[in-house]
Amino acid sequence: MEMWEKDPLEDFIQTFLVRLSPSKELPESIQSFQVFRDDELNIVMQVNSHADSRPTIEEKPLGLVYQLDNQIELKGYVGSGTLHRVALFNTTSKILNDNQDSATISKYKVSELNFTISTSETSYTIDHIANLPGNYTWPNASNSKESGTQEICFLGEPPITITRPLPSIDSINRNCVRIEIGGHTVILASVKEKNHSSAKRPGYIFYSGNPDKTTREKIRASLSFALGMPLVYLSSCFYKETGGLIGFEASSPATMGGRAWRLVSQPFAPITSYPTNILDTNAFKQIATAFFENYDSMNLQSFIFRLWHAEISPSYMKAAYYGAMVESIQKRETHKPNSTISHTIIEKAEYRKAIKILSRFLEKQKIPKEAKESLLNKIQNGNTAPQRTLADRFYSTMGLALGSLETAAWDRRNDAAHGNEEVPGTEIESFRSTKILRVILARIVIKLLQASEYYIDYYSLDHPIRLLSQAIPNDTD
């Protein structure tokens, strides 16, 4: 196992002789402690103390909404660090009469942990991740070489030392994809699951140099978007050129209640060399780079958050989420200062003439004054194009044709949004309409990002690849 495939939490306490600094969240008399990941990969700290030494629990009013912002300092023989947002969730005591071995075990959830060993310059960074898709063949390989010597010394006068070379081990693994993004060489690699006791479909991301935390978050989001499923972040390790560890950061992962593990890879655009499942490096890079470069200008942090939550939502609600995302994008794009899309039904000059005629007509009608004023107000604002018209103009401007299937699916989206009951016997039709809404969203996003000329049609059998301008064909048309 390569050194960067190892979870930095595994043995750092023993390696650097780490101890906890006093804190109000901790027992006063600590005998030992350990930090590990639970079955869901959350960071847990277990503190052992005497039975009479229990942590103080801060009482909070029932229903109080608050953000935890505490921290506990770590001091090591070499290095120091901090535990961030530490919350006690379980305390048990084992009392054995007057036995001094009686103990209190306190368990804490830890949001983040960082530890710095030295201030040396970082030559490369490794992010440990999980939830890599397992259905692709990696296009690039890594070559691992191990060699060395064995030395045996027979003590006595004079000592006898025998040195012999060990056989070298040379292995090549096809386990990664290498691209340039954000000014850094980035390598996304998978790791054999047997090397990790708890991680689910583990891997790592290699970065040349030391991209800051925000940049790495953007790159991970971009890789996730290109793959069509969320990569789960675990930790980052920082290394010197010679391979020495400078420090690390670790987090309890965001897995959306564990539902991220159940998602499968469904990229919006093709990332493999058709018809194989081998990742196409150029296609993968183009999509990831396009997402990275538009991350801030298009508020893609919010988009990717909403996308993953739409993906894990119940099937009967997906249509509402996909539809809301499409409408949000349409609204943003059509209201841009440089947008050429008209928001009126007819030209403003023509409508001003129509207002005069309609107003004079209403003034002559014998209706209550209050009703007349309400109607006149509606006339003044009656030239605003309806959402359906704006949507048609939006698609036309982008060069995206919508067929009868897309139009029908768009009309049905309101059933989920408004909580309308599903008519028995229409469940399959509803599921398929939801697939179409996702395809509509995909075509819009890929077009705006200029990430590809194609999209994957998840509605049709065998998931064919189509040009972005092409609508989903309706076999009955």
Image: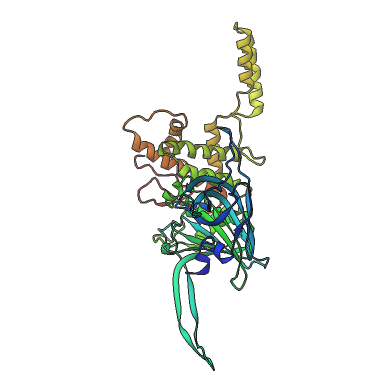
Q: Is residue 117 above or below residue 102?
A: below
User: Residue at position x 64%, y 13% from top?
Assistant: 373
Q: Nearer the viewer, residue 192 or 209?
A: 192
Name the colour scheme. rainbow
How far across and down, in percent of the image, does residue 302 sit?
57, 44
Instruction: Looking at this view, name the residue that lies furthest to the left.
Output: 425
Q: In the rendered view of the protein, which quadrant contains the C terminus?
A: top left
How far across and down, in percent of the image, does residue 191 sit?
46, 64
How far across and down, in percent of the image, does residue 33 sit?
54, 56
Place residue 286 in its image quadrant. bottom right
Q: Is residue 327 above or below residue 238?
A: above
How far across and down, in percent of the image, does residue 152 sit?
49, 86
Whether residue 423 sits left or right of residue 66 in the image: it is left
Instruction: Looking at this view, name the residue that lies furthest to the top.
Output: 366
Residue 399 in view of the camera: no
Q: Which of 312 and 385 is in front in this view?
A: 312
Q: Is residue 307 above or below residue 121?
A: above
Whether residue 189 sits left or right of residue 115 in the image: it is left
User: Residue at position x 60%, y 11% from top?
Assistant: 371
Q: Nearer the viewer, residue 84 or 292?
A: 84
Q: Which of 343 and 124 is in front in this view?
A: 124
Instruction: Looking at this view, name the residue that lies furthest to the bottom.
Output: 158
Residue 388 in view of the camera: yes
